[in-house]
Amino acid sequence: MRPFVYLSPSSLDECLKVLGELKDKAKIIAGGTDLVVNMRAETVNPEYVVDIERLRELRFIRIDDGNLRIGAATKIAQIEGSELVRQKAFALYQAASQVGAVQTRNLGTIAGNLASAVPSADMAPPLIAMDAELVVMSSGGQRSLKVEDLFAGPKATVLKPDEVITEVVIPGTSLNDRTWFLKLGRRKALTLAIVNVAVRLRMAEAVVREARVALGAVAPVPMRSRSAEEWLVGRPANAENFRIAAEKAAADSKPITDFRAGAEYRRKMVKVLTKRALSACVGEGEMA
């Protein structure tokens, strides 16, 4: 690891000022579960590391104006332990409970998991499925960004060097929908996803009125299967329609072969997990 200057701002305003001055010379650290690994491997070599651990204003889970708002520095373990998240955003709760080890969940943050932009990041699919947005701030102002629009490529985002994610916002319109998350890894715990899938269904009289199908680890960035979503809308929530939607999701996926799994295996597992997740949403079929 190369030498660097460590900075620990005591307020968000101070943090934004520092980032505005340093720009691409600095990297933000929260839990450090990704950044420290990359710095040790010298794939990332910042001159300055800006620690947001002291920014307690970025650590919260609450309902505000009908939306579920989660502070960027909220630990994944806090999300896993939140009854509010469990009740309102079940797929996010499921994903949080499957991130790494206990130690990783106690250190890692929701924004860090997203900003690392790893295609297999577990927080991304449920947030994409729930149409979540990010509040992004810099010394020049504030903007909103859809989670699905955050990713520019593997380990790359559209964030500017002086910007920091401050909040994740799940709209109230998604909070009463049915959601589910499934993850397949090489082990049952402490593993990166070979495939992960999150789905959201809005139902009316057993007919799907709105659908989201989000996939991870099967493309350069976490993605939606729009063809699966389009197929589901307006159709009965039954096994045959779920089977066809799962086939469309598999066709949309763009997996690669690496040391953890082959592309064709990943594509087949997209089909399996998507069908299982959709069935679980309506209380039918295999739910794990």
Image (cartoon, rainbow, N blue to C red):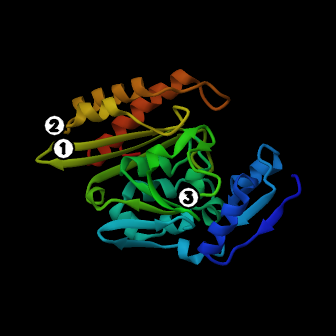
**How busy is the neighbourhood of tag 3: few (under 14 within 10 Å), some, or many (20 plus)?**
many
Which residue corresponds to mark 1?
Answer: 209
Image disc number at residue 111: 3
**For mark 2, does the 10 Å Cα neighbourhood hold few (<14), some (14 to 19), or many (20 or more) residues?**
some
Q: Earlier in the sequence, mark 3 or mark 2?
A: 3
Residue kind at label 3, given as amino acid type: Ala
In the displayed structure, 186 sits above or below 39; it is above
Q: Are marks 3 and 2 in contact (CB under 8 Å)?
A: no
Q: Earlier in the sequence, mark 1 or mark 2?
A: 1
Disc number for residue 234: 2
Residue 186, image x, y percentages? 60, 38
- Which marked residue is nearer to the observer: mark 3 or mark 2? 3
For residue 288, which quarter of the picture?
top left
Label 3: which secondary element = helix
Comparing 235 with 171, the one in front is 171
Question: In the image, what residue occupies the spot 78% across and 53% down?
Answer: 46
At numbered mark 2, what does the secondary structure look like: helix, strand or loop?
loop
Mark 1 and mark 2 in contact? Answer it, CB < 8 Å. Answer: yes
| Residues at marks 1 and 2, CA–CA distance in whole angstroms | 6 Å
Query: Quick one: label 1 or label 3, which is nearer the N terminus?
Result: 3
Q: Which residue is painted at 46% across and 58% down in the image? A: 143
**Residue mark closest to the camera, 1 vs 3:** 3
SS at mark 1 in the image = strand
Tell me which residue sits at (47%, 26%) in the image.
Answer: 267
**Three-letter amino acid code of the residue under disc 2:** Gly
Q: 277 left or right of 164?
A: left
Residue 219 in the image: x percent, y percent?
A: 52, 31
| Above-or-below relation of 16 to 239 | below
For residue 239, say whether it is visible. Answer: no
Q: Separation of disc 1 and disc 3 at Cα?
A: 30 Å
